[in-house]
Amino acid sequence: MQTITKDILSQVYPPRHPDAKKYDHGLLLVIGGGDFYTGSPALTALAAFRSGCDMVQVLAPQRAANIIAGFSPNLAVYPLTGLWLDQEDLPTLLYLTQSAEAVAPGKTAVVIGGGLGRSEDTQRTVQGYLEKTTNLRAVIDSDGIHAAAKKIEIIRGRNFIFTPHAYEFFILTGQDIKNIEFSEKIKIVQQEAAKLGGIIVLKGRKDIISDGQQVIIDETGSPYMAVGGTGDTLAGIAGSLLAQGAEPFLAAQAASFINGKAGEAAAEKFAAGMMATDLIEEIPNIIKS
């Protein structure tokens, strides 16, 4: 078992070639948002940009898309048909994913789940999307975990990055870890990652990251990161690193470290007044350091 250090940054941020062009360092699709949680995919997208991804496209239900488009001129936002993700949107999601892969072959990744909601129709759409995108490099977060957990066979062995907190971990694995010793949590995360054939980042005071074989502990972070949105930023950083070409297990470790250190820096400035957007603004400083 190892602890992450700043040395991991050099592994995911090699020097850029002077002739680098757009998409050489990634194209990320963020699928999220709904009638209520409109900020989640925006936070994910902005964190992805700040952690080095060349281009981020947000695919969101119509109301959420219209709101997100006003957050920043950096965000490219595609409005889907209704107030929430449903099966009518599946052909569009598949088409836009195929288009992204054609533009940035080998440098495309997806973050799916933040703010989508948990209606049956939305969950079936997420399941259908994951089933039909067999070569996807993806981060499954939040409501995406709830959807995928109901059809576990579609995610097993896919080498996805899952970013659950304790309750989402229970939904994903059936394991209740709230009141057990940290050493026991480590064993359970490792076992469940092996069963899934993917990478689990169990968010907590110390993040536990495992690919089913190795276990890595991230000790960065701050209690002020309990504010809403810092899980969205983690997913965005992880997706950004996937799109830039990092292998999933490495991307998961580096994302946890960057998110935690940026959270520490934001907390130093704002303490209890810290917001997720403050964390996002600290990401480049962590990378530069």
Image (cartoon, helix red, strand yellow):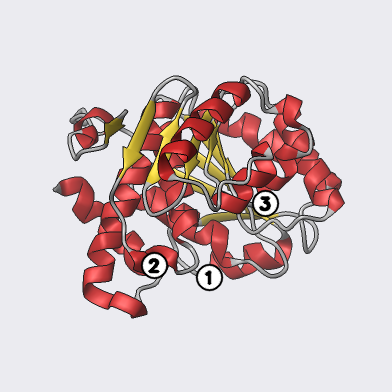
At x 62%, y 49%, the residue is 168
Alpha-carbon span between mark 3 and mark 2: 21 Å
The spot of residue 56 in percent (x, y) is 48, 47
The spot of residue 122 in percent (x, y) is 79, 50
The spot of residue 44 in percent (x, y) is 48, 54
Q: Quadrant of residue 87?
A: top right
Q: Tell which tag, 1 or 2, sits nearer the viewer.
A: 2
Q: What residue type is labelled 3?
A: Asp
From the image, tell me which residue sits under label 2: 277
Upstream in the sequence, badge 1 or badge 2?
1
Upstream in the sequence, badge 3 or badge 2?
3
From the image, tell me which residue sits under label 1: 70
Q: Quadrant of residue 138?
A: top right
At x 82%, y 55%, the residue is 119
Task: Classify residue 286 as left or right of residue 128.
Answer: left
- As displayed, is residue 193 above or below residue 147? above
Disc 1 element: loop
Q: Tell which tag, 3 or 2, sits nearer the viewer.
A: 3
From the image, tell me which residue sits under label 3: 143
